Amino acid sequence: MSFGETIFLFLLALVVFGPKKLPEIGRQIGKLMAEFKRASNEFRSQVETEIAQLDVKENRATKPDWSKTLQDRLMAPTKPPEGVVAIGSAEPPETSKAHDV
């Protein structure tokens, strides 16, 4: 709305409602606009809260379950195949002093 249109509407309202009613109508319009703004902000806040809650639920579904203990989450150690000597489990060979002579 341009400035000229605003002035025209003000003059039209002044003629239709009179100078005594115009301030009262202005206050009522102001209160209605404030109420509308409050309601729209409340609605926007509720929508944002719902979206945040959905994001939290989605993140919980994709993250690992930390309620399990570390040992439950790790793979159990496996035994080496039979016939294979595991590193560190064999006795070091004994050296014979007979060959050193």
Image (cartoon, grey):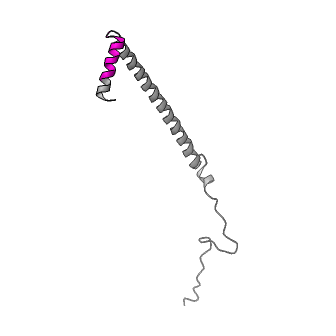
Main SS, magenta region, reads helix
Residue 92, given in percent of the width and then of the height, sits at: 59, 76
Numbered label tally: 0
Residue 97 in view (yes/no): yes
- Residue at 66% x, 69% y is 80
Image: magenta residue range: 7-20
What residue occupies the far right of the structure in this picture? 82
Residue 9, given in percent of the width and then of the height, sits at: 34, 21
Up-down relation of residue 61 to residue 38 (above or below) = below
- Residue at 53% x, 38% y is 53
Q: Quadrant of the C terminus?
A: bottom right
> Left or right: where does residue 20 sit relative to residue 57?
left
Residue 22 in view (yes/no): no
Up-down relation of residue 67 to residue 9 (above or below) = below
Towards the viewer: 71 or 23: 23
Towards the viewer: 8 or 29: 8
Residue 40, given in percent of the width and then of the height, sits at: 46, 28
> Does residue 73 show up magenta in the picture?
no
* Image-quadrant location for residue 90: bottom right
> Does residue 13 show up magenta in the picture?
yes
- Residue at 59% x, 71% y is 88
Up-down relation of residue 4 to residue 63 (above or below) = above
> Left or right: where does residue 74 sit relative to residue 41?
right
- Residue at 29% x, 26% y is 4
Residue 95, given in percent of the width and then of the height, sits at: 58, 82
* Image-quadrant location for residue 89: bottom right
Up-down relation of residue 90 to residue 12 (above or below) = below
Towards the viewer: 35 or 79: 35
> Left or right: where does residue 68 sit relative to residue 51?
right
